[in-house]
Image (tube, rainbow, N blue to C red):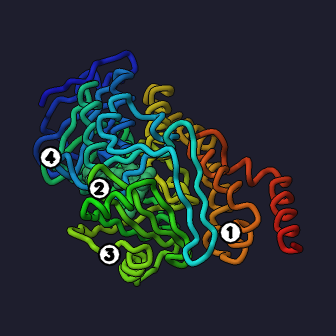
Amino acid sequence: MNLRAKRSGFQSAWCHSLAGKEFCGDTHGLNAGKITNFDVVVIGAGPAGATAALALARNGFAVGLLEKAALPRYKTCGGGVLHRAYQLLPPETETVVERSFHSVALNFLGTDLNFVTTRPQPIVHMTMRADLDCLLTRAAEKAGVQVIESCPVKRVNMQAEFVELVSDRENFRAKFVIAADGVHSVTARTTGWSELPALAPALEYEIYLADEDFARFSQQPRFDFNAIDAGYAWVFSKRAHLSVGILSTRRVCADLPNKLADYLRQIGLTRIQKIEKHGFLIPLAPRREPLARGRVLLVGDAAGLADPVMAEGISHALQSGRLAAAALSECRLDVAKASATYQSLLEQHILPELRAGRFLAKFLYHHPKIRRAAFRAGGQRLCEFVTDVVMGERSYREAVNQPANYLKLLGRWASRASD
Ligand SMILES: Cc1cc2nc3c(=O)[nH]c(=O)nc-3n(C[C@H](O)[C@H](O)[C@H](O)COP(=O)(O)OP(=O)(O)OC[C@H]3O[C@@H](n4cnc5c(N)ncnc54)[C@H](O)[C@@H]3O)c2cc1C
């Protein structure tokens, strides 16, 4: 195997002698055969993993990025990259952006509540995740990461001095593992983390229409409440087709396909030429334990970091990937410091926002009367606020921590009610 990562003073003596090399010997329970060593192995080449691997390689570590699929691979996702996420991506990302939108619509189906927010900069960039993830992974590869595709990791064993990774193809050893293997994380499962506590089932249909119908639905992205209880539906326009989806924040929602079929009829999206149907889960709350333990750090969906209000996950996937890389770089792969450093970075940058988001999401999804009243009283303001969050200019914490915000909303509600 060819080790492309640069070496630095950060690497331990263990890695100086073994990084990227193969040996056969004491396998500590691994399949007998080839073992490849790295400073850090990142599992999963989604946005979280590719970002972490790139940052670590740039800091001089020997990094292996193991991906179960061959890239590019389809990923069930709307592919909407919010402005706050786009800011974290490398400039060459613009080559995989199919459309960018300055305006976004929010509707409450069956009512007169319809809102549009507009910003001078694009609010959201539309991508196909196969292209985006492949681009990020190739960028990591160029920076020296050894990308190993078609390599599903089956088991991760934490040892005192290193971590062992077992795959069908070969085995690996690393000083640290970053688990970016998504919502079904094998790493979290085989190293003892509890289940993700809040999973939202979601469907994503790739829909192809005749030109005149496509023109009608591709003006701006739309989000629609009232298509489903405790969730929403959306239409995103790509270059030549629509990504249409629906999600429920209730874990068990058996009739999601029927709800999506009803939604398509309700908005008049009926003359479909071709349709590809996909479904997956979105983790709306982090795992209960600290998100790093010993030599393993969880990032992105594997950690459960999607935004609980919007069910958007790319922003925190990118951010947590960067934070995990920063923690390992800062503590120079010191196992005594790594977990605490990563957890403290998450506490500074992501976790309080998720807590505030979950508080707001309760009202949005589980108290429809309050939601309706709040949007009737101040819907445009609420949409502008969420758009500011999307743009990375404001936070949910602000809304939750400032009691004046509730009082203002109640005041508007009361004055509307007395009109
Ligand atoms: C229907 C739907 C629509 C969505 N729409 C949006 C949207 O428009 N915008 C947005 O921001 N978010 C959206 N999300 C959420 C978003 O897709 C995720 O939050 C995001 O992909 C998380 O990135 P990640 O890198 O953590 O994990 P993933 O993108 O899931 O990447 C995990 C990677 O790990 C690999 N892997 C898994 N197991 C193994 C293994 N054992 N060994 C090796 N590799 C492995 C997988 O193949 C995959 O490449 C949507 C989600 C769904 C389900």
Q: Nearer the viewer, mark 3 or mark 1?
A: 3
Vertical arrangement, residue 339 with respect to residue 236, above or below:
above
Q: Which mark is residue 155?
A: none
Crowd around label 4: few <14 · some 14–19 · many ≥20 (10 Å):
some
Reading the image, the residue beneath label 2 is: 75
Q: Whole-Å distance between the Cαs marked 4 and 1?
A: 48 Å
Q: Nearer the viewer, mark 3 or mark 2?
A: 3
Quick check: can you spot residue 30? no
Reading the image, the residue beneath label 3 is: 270
Q: Earlier in the sequence, mark 4 or mark 1?
A: 4
Q: Whole-Å distance between the Cαs marked 2 and 1?
A: 30 Å
Reading the image, the residue beneath label 4 is: 170
Amino acid residing under circle 4 = Glu
Q: Nearer the viewer, residue 356 or 411?
A: 411
Q: Nearer the viewer, mark 4 or mark 2?
A: 2
Residue at the image position 28 percent from the left and 57 percent from the top? 241
Crowd around label 3: few <14 · some 14–19 · many ≥20 (10 Å):
few
Q: Nearer the viewer, residue 361 or 232?
A: 232
Task: Answer with the quadrant where ligand 1 appears in the image.
Answer: bottom left
Q: Whole-Å distance between the Cαs marked 4 and 3?
A: 48 Å
Reading the image, the residue beneath label 1 is: 363
Q: Nearer the viewer, residue 263 or 50?
A: 263
- The residue carrying mark 2 has its beta carbon less than 8 Å from ligand 1: yes
Q: Position of residue 222 (x, y in %)?
A: 48, 60
Quadrant that contains the C terminus: bottom right
Circles 2 and 1, Cβ within 8 Å, touching? The answer is no
Vertical arrangement, residue 99 with respect to residue 276, above or below:
above
Quadrant that contains the N terminus: top left
Amino acid residing under circle 1 = Phe
